[in-house]
Amino acid sequence: MTRSVLGAAFAVLLAAGPAAAESFGPAAPPNPWLGPAGTATMHGDAEASDTTPLPGPGTGPVDASFHPIGGACPTILVGSDGLPVALCTLLTTRIPTAFLLDPAGGAPLASLPTRTGGGTVLGGVYAFLDNRDRLVTVDGAGNLEWIGHDRGPDGAWRLYIDHTAPTASIVPAGDAVSSATPDRTGAIWLATEHGTVAVLRADGGIAAVSLGGDPAARQIGDGELVENSIAAAAGGVAVATDHALYLLNTDAAGTPSIRWRQAYDRGPARKPGQLSAGTGATPTFFGPRTGSEYVAITDNAVPQEHLLVYSTATGEPICSVAVLPPGPSGTENSPIGIGDTVIVAGTYGYPYPAGAVGPSDPASAPFTGGMTRVDVDDSGAGCTVRWNNTVPSAAVPRLSTADGRIYTFTRHTSGAAATPLDGYDYAVIDAATGALETEQPVGVGLPVDTLEMVGSIAPGGVQYQGTVTGYFSVRPRG
């Protein structure tokens, strides 16, 4: 099939999806420099909404196929050609490797390792698909890479490095790029783990600003850490550090500049079920008029987590609302945001493998789970909790605006503490009420641990979900 035919099929699938139980929206206009909305970034789009316009597999019986590849797959994206691309970190080498997947069954068609390793199980960067279906990521040497795919003369699929751009000039020694996303001019914004934010312009020029002061004078360990992805909207680029939320723009010279900063309650330490101290959230843009007039994160308050919503234009607080089950709570996941609605999923107590930043307090705790939906008031002057549930989501949930459902995987323990023999289920939640509509077992044990990774919904109602050692493809049965 040609790209134009596949693109038309993509549009037909949108139109053919089941009627939504509740109307959600509007979404922000698609970023012209990205692939399809809902499948182009780890969190769906440049605004990190964790929504998709595609219907999911639904609440009927599903077939869940597991594909073991010997690596953790936190990023599975789908381009306009309908081909999924996964970025997985091989457990034996710690080298992030791109995999091109067969949309018919989910099996790998081709693979390509980045030139140097990322060093951690979850890799070193949040990747995205551009408007030419190229995977854009950063290798361990600090080069921004555009990875394309095509068929060779023998008809076999291949992945190849189409273009590279060095970033070493703006990355301090000992630091590394952790996130990249394009803005609406086509410039690519980068954030490093130790708080440098840079812009790679279309002409190849690059400029940076440090969130912890002058990058030339700063020592690693000073300033603020960026442990999550960044998000870009019409009003600017949002970056959350372990101390504050920032909104940045570029000045007349194309240099990133801080428009506003809002500190939050970062708590006394990392909580169990988090990878670092401070917020566990990638900032989420949303709003009932433009799709991005608000931006939200979660704090790290003790004992209970709060959702924080700000005006994108001014940084003024809209609300601070306690979320998740009363008592100890926390999350490592980005909120879902669409229209006037935000949904937060808890990860408190989730047993992550080694690699978190600093000790947690307490050292461990039972996996709590639970979700909270919060709606911003029509006046834009406050927020109201719409519902709470106790669903133990073990993945970053994705909301389908086509069918009004939240798609995730759940984890179930046989006792008070999580074990390597826990079971995992495909789960669907009614976004209007928070009710669990279906749970269907898909696997047991460490190899299928979804590890709070992101799921991605592809055309045809297919859901891809990464695990510690591979990924699931979930399809409606029949």
Image: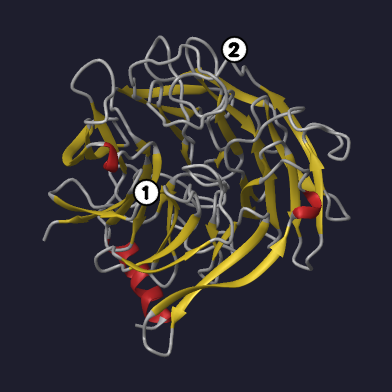
Earlier-in-chain disc, 1 versus 2: 2
Residue 421, picture quadrant: top left
Q: Which residue is mark 2?
A: 268
In the rendered image, is residue 223 in sight?
A: yes
Q: Which mark is residue 392?
A: none
How far, Cα to Cα, is label 1 from label 2?
Answer: 37 Å
Residue at 33% in and 73% down: 9
**Which one is closest to the eye, mark 1 or mark 2?**
2
Residue 417 lies, in percent from the top left, at 28, 18
Disc 2 element: loop
In the image, is 420 to the left or to the right of 321?
A: left
Instruction: Please give the count of numbered marks on the rendered protein.
Output: 2
Local crowd size for mark 2, using a 10 Å CA cut-off: few (<14), some (14–19), many (≥20): few
Residue 314, picture quadrant: top right
State the quadrant of the N terminus.
Answer: bottom left
Q: Which residue is mark 1?
A: 401
Residue furthest bottom in the image: 153
Local crowd size for mark 1, using a 10 Å CA cut-off: few (<14), some (14–19), many (≥20): many
In the image, is 208 to the left or to the right of 61?
A: right
State the quadrant of the C terminus.
Answer: bottom left
Residue 237 lies, in percent from the top left, at 68, 45
Q: What kind of residue is marked 2?
A: Pro
Residue at 37% in and 37% down: 451
Decide which of 340, 111 is in the foreground and name it. 111
In the image, is 230 to the left or to the right of 340?
A: right
In the rendered image, is residue 235 in sight?
A: no
Decide which of 281, 405 is in the foreground and name it. 281
Disc 1 element: loop
Q: What kind of residue is marked 1?
A: Thr
